[in-house]
Image (cartoon, helix red, strand yellow):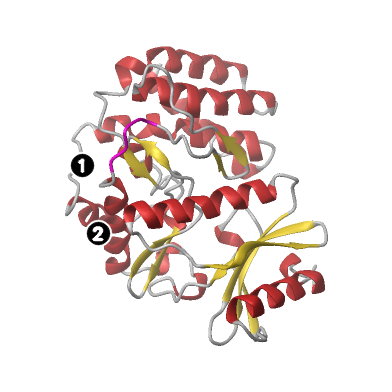
Amino acid sequence: MPHPLLDPLVVQAVRQAAAEHRGRAWTPAGFTDLSHRASHPCGIFSGTPFSVFAKLGRSPAARAQFTAELRGFRLIRARAGVPVPVPLAGGIAAAGQVTLLLTEALPEGGDRAGQAADGRTAGDYAAIGRTLAGLHQVPGTAFGLTEFDGFFGPLPQSNQPVDSGSWADFFAERRLRPMLRLAAASGHLPDELSAGTERVLASLPARCGPDPGPALLHGDAQQNNFVAAAGGAVVIDVAPYYGHPEADLALVDVFSPVAPELWRGYAQAAPLDPGFAGRRELWRLPVYLAAVAVSGGSPFGRSFLPRLAAAVRRYR
């Protein structure tokens, strides 16, 4: 089956957006599929003087998702000075029944041409750690983000601050409880795990530790959402808000291990709290529930049930 990004309507939309961005005609010379690294079909159209990264959304919510991602890029660039992709034209294009997110492709370093994370060098991992620490150096006034809500993958995510102003309450009401509802509604979450997660929710004030100062987060900081480019790590697939830095740190290796240089790179600017190791699985609970909600009928989604069960036993 042809790749959905190679549909003629899609290719024409990419050409038009790239031509508008460049100011004259632009022609793709090849295509690299990167769908193995994302929840959407995506890839790079190679060309001169720039290549184009394209992500394709089929759902009615795709435009809202991509709009939130572009707003996240602008916010992170403005407030943290961290490198982000450059949108093409307006960044969003329609192609028949699908929606495209279009940016300049990044000149990749250690994970050239979209290789898996295990193709990275120690220096690439250190750069990711430093970039993440740079984000976390930007303080906020409250947990959340008043400017706009976002998405975690395809799932909507409220960023609105909670009345109490505490991290435990924000994490419960804006991250953990909504994902629990979605996972339960999917029909793929066993009743005992749903009840166990409810008990964790009740114990959060005692489990979350002292409130840190709100810090700017990537929001979906698993390691494939950083591209190790020649000048350092660039953030992609962002879902920013102000929160506990450990919520980002818990995600960098949630799907696959990272090299120790990432942690050393991070610690150069922001020391790790000794209590983080004991809280890491707590911050991962919404991710496990999201995987069940979205993919619980597949082997991938079901693979998170044992991890969820172990975390529930630990924290309930």
**Left or right relative to 114: residue 25:** right
Element on which disc 1 rests = loop
Viewer-proximal residue, 92 or 48?
92
Q: Is residue 19 visible?
A: yes
Q: Position of residue 233 (x, y in %)?
A: 36, 64
Residue 109 location (% of width, % of height): 39, 75
Q: Earlier in the sequence, mark 2 or mark 1?
A: 2
Quarter holding residue 272: top left
Label 2 close to label 1 by CB (< 8 Å): no
Asked if residue 248 lies left or right of residue 44, the reply is left
Is the residue 294 above or below the residue 7 in the image? above
Span shown in magenta = 139-143
| Mark 2: amino acid | Glu
| Above or below for 162 versus 276 | above
Is 93 in front, or is 42? 93
Quadrant location of the C terminus in the rendered image:
top left
Mark 2 = which residue? 261
Q: Amino acid at mark 1?
A: Leu
Residue at numbered disc 1: 272
Residue 218 drawn at (x, y percent): 41, 48
